[in-house]
Image (cartoon, rainbow, N blue to C red):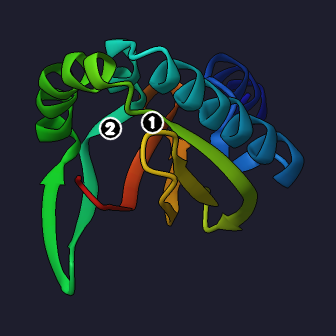
């Protein structure tokens, strides 16, 4: 009877994210990254929904020889995205990503890329840590980027 109960209980639970193969996690991470790029290049505020509220965001601004580090949560970034995107769209500030690599990091996946500003031509490293959130939907849990405002 215990075995039957355990079997029925396990069938009723959603599939465990940690039971995903590396290939499945890679595909989910790639899908999330592709969606992020797609929404970002269209100045779509829906990109804010890709971030976990408690994500750790680090933005380093390069101003000449100085670097200014800003840290915020995903929730704070969502507010920033909603105010920033209209300005970015007005001046045509968007990015192209290259040299993309995805590697496992625990139950999450780290995505590294080179990010090129289409406005200035500046190229900087970019990285995000993505993984399952509530319900198994992949979210961005960490983002590190460098920007050079002109």
User: To which quarter of the image does residue 61 belong?
Assistant: bottom left
Mark earlier in primary sequence (1, 2): 2
Give the camera-side residue of 64 and 112: 64
Residue at image location 43% in from the left, 49% down from the top: 120
Q: Which residue is mark 1?
A: 133
**Which percent across, then down, holds residue 113?**
63, 59
Mark 1 or 2: the one toward you: 2
Residue at image location 85% in from the left, 49% down from the top: 21
Q: CA distance from mark 1 to mark 2?
A: 8 Å
**Which percent across, then down, holds residue 27?**
80, 38
- Classify 106 as above or below 20: below
Give the camera-side residue of 125 and 120: 120
Residue at image location 73% in from the left, 56% down from the top: 100
In the picture, the disc for residue 10 is none
Give the camera-side residue of 74 and 64: 64
Within 10 Å of disc 1 (Cα), the crowding (few <14, some 14-19, many 20+) is some
Element carrying mark 2: strand
Residue at image location 39% in from the left, 12% down from the top: 44
Is residue 82 visible in this depiction of the protein?
yes
Is residue 137 visible in this depiction of the protein?
no
- Classify 31 as above or below 30: above
- Classify 10 as above or below 110: above
Label tally: 2
Element carrying mark 1: loop
Drawn side of residue 76 relative to residue 41, left or right = left
Drawn side of residue 94 relative to residue 100, left or right = left
Drawn side of residue 78 relative to residue 8, left or right = left
Drawn side of residue 54 relative to residue 137, left or right = left
- Classify 11 as above or below 131: above
Q: Which residue is mark 2?
A: 52
Give the camera-side residue of 4 and 85: 85
**Which percent across, then down, holds residue 46?**
37, 13
């Amino acid at each position: 009877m215990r075995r039957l109960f355990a079997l029925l209980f396990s069938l009723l639970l959603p599939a465990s994210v940690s039971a995903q193969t590396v290939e499945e996690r890679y595909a989910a991470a790639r899908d999330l990254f592709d969606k992020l790029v797609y929404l970002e290049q269209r100045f779509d505020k829906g990109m804010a929904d890709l971030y976990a509220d408690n994500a750790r965001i680090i933005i380093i601004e390069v101003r000449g020889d100085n670097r200014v580090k800003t840290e915020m949560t995903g929730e704070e970034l969502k507010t920033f995205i909603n105010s920033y995107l209209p300005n970015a769209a007005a001046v045509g500030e968007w990015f192209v990503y290259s040299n993309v690599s995805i590697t496992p990091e625990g139950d999450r996946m780290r995505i590294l890329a080179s990010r090129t500003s289409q406005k200035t031509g500046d190229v900087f490293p970019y990285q995000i840590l993505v993984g399952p959130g509530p319900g198994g939907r992949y979210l961005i849990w960490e983002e590190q980027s460098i920007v050079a405002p002109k």
